[in-house]
Image (cartoon, helix red, strand yellow):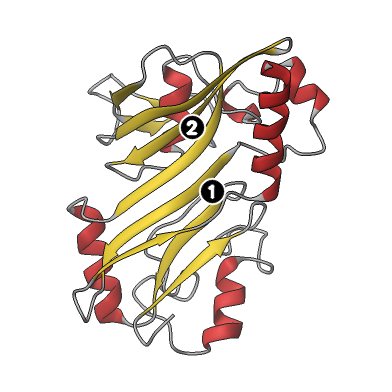
């Protein structure tokens, strides 16, 4: 944290900003308590300082702007894809290619408005979305096949990694919204799984004032490490 930005390691289960029926316990509530009035006002009273978001059940790094100049600079960097965001995820199934790029537009699901989907119909509103993935480790267990992957966002659409990985047949472990949660492994480890196994591990950006290139990296959360340990043991 400095006078311009604050980088936060958000725990899983915490919502980033207030929404309908949710007024307390969000990251914004915590930021207001910690920073007082020193957050940018561009996002309005509901989203002060919030430049980008991560889902409630996704853990990891995000940057918050403490003044309007910082907010404008970070927003511009996100728009030109100059902020590097790397996520780690555990997906269902064996991802055959060691690396790849998913370039599929994302928009609102045609039926379920709470979900996003790959949208190919030009008549429906969708935005370009690009995810680069790389396999870290593969697991073949008695309870199924799983793959530990690293995903780099080129764009930042809502639920992007979750939708993109599901679109190639590899839903994230624990992601019941997009077809996960049905494996024997997930049933055996319900106590560890609270939503999708997704963690924002690395964040790289240019400081809005000093123009210094800054890189932040955070460890995997305990639940994620435990899931990997169990998969490794079962694969032996």
Q: Which mark is on residue 117?
A: none
- Expressed as whole percent of the image width and height from the top left, the position of residue 218 reads 51, 57
10 Å crowding of disc 2: few (<14), some (14-19), many (20+): many
In terms of sequence position, does the residue under pointer 1 or pointer 2 come before the other? 1
The N terminus: image quadrant: bottom left
* Residue drawn at x 56%, y 81% as measured from the top left: 32
37 up-or-down from 174: above or below: below
As helix, strand or loop, the secondary structure at mark 1 comes to loop
38 up-or-down from 118: above or below: below
* Residue drawn at x 62%, y 46% as measured from the top left: 57
- Expressed as whole percent of the image width and height from the top left, the position of residue 180 reads 63, 23
As helix, strand or loop, the secondary structure at mark 2 comes to helix
Residue 176 makes an appearance in the image? yes
- Expressed as whole percent of the image width and height from the top left, the position of residue 47 reads 46, 69
The image quarter containing residue 216 is: bottom left
Disc 1/disc 2 C-alpha distance (Å): 10 Å
Residue 110 makes an appearance in the image? no
Residue, disc 1: 55
197 up-or-down from 2: above or below: above
- Closer-to-camera residue (157/196): 196
The C terminus: image quadrant: top right
10 Å crowding of disc 1: few (<14), some (14-19), many (20+): some
Q: Going by the image, does 224 lie left or right of 77?
A: right
Residue, disc 2: 162
* Residue drawn at x 71%, y 39% as measured from the top left: 226
- Expressed as whole percent of the image width and height from the top left, the position of residue 217 reads 44, 58
């Amino acid at each position: 944290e400095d006078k311009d930005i604050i980088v936060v390691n958000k725990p899983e289960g915490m919502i980033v900003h207030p929404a309908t029926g949710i007024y307390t316990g969000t990251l914004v509530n915590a930021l207001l308590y910690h920073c007082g009035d020193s957050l940018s006002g561009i996002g309005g009273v509901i989203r002060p300082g919030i430049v980008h978001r991560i889902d409630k059940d996704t853990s990891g790094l995000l940057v918050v702007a403490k003044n309007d100049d910082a907010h404008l600079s970070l927003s511009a960097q996100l728009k030109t894809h100059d902020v590097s965001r790397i996520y780690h995820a555990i997906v269902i199934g064996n991802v055959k290619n060691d690396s790849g790029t998913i370039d599929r537009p994302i928009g609102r699901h045609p039926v379920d408005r709470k979900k996003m989907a790959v949208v190919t119909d030009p008549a429906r509103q969708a935005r370009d979305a690009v995810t680069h993935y790389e396999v870290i480790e593969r697991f073949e267990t008695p309870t199924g096949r799983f793959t530990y992957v690293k995903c780099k966002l080129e764009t930042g659409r809502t639920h992007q990694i979750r939708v993109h990985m599901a679109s190639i047949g590899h839903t994230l472990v624990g992601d019941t919204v997009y077809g996960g949660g049905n494996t024997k492994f997930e049933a055996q480890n319900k106590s560890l799984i609270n939503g999708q196994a997704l963690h924002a591990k690395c964040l790289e950006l240019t400081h809005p004032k000093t123009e210094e290139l800054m890189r932040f990296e955070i460890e995997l959360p305990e639940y994620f490490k435990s899931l990997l340990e169990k998969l490794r043991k079962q694969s032996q």
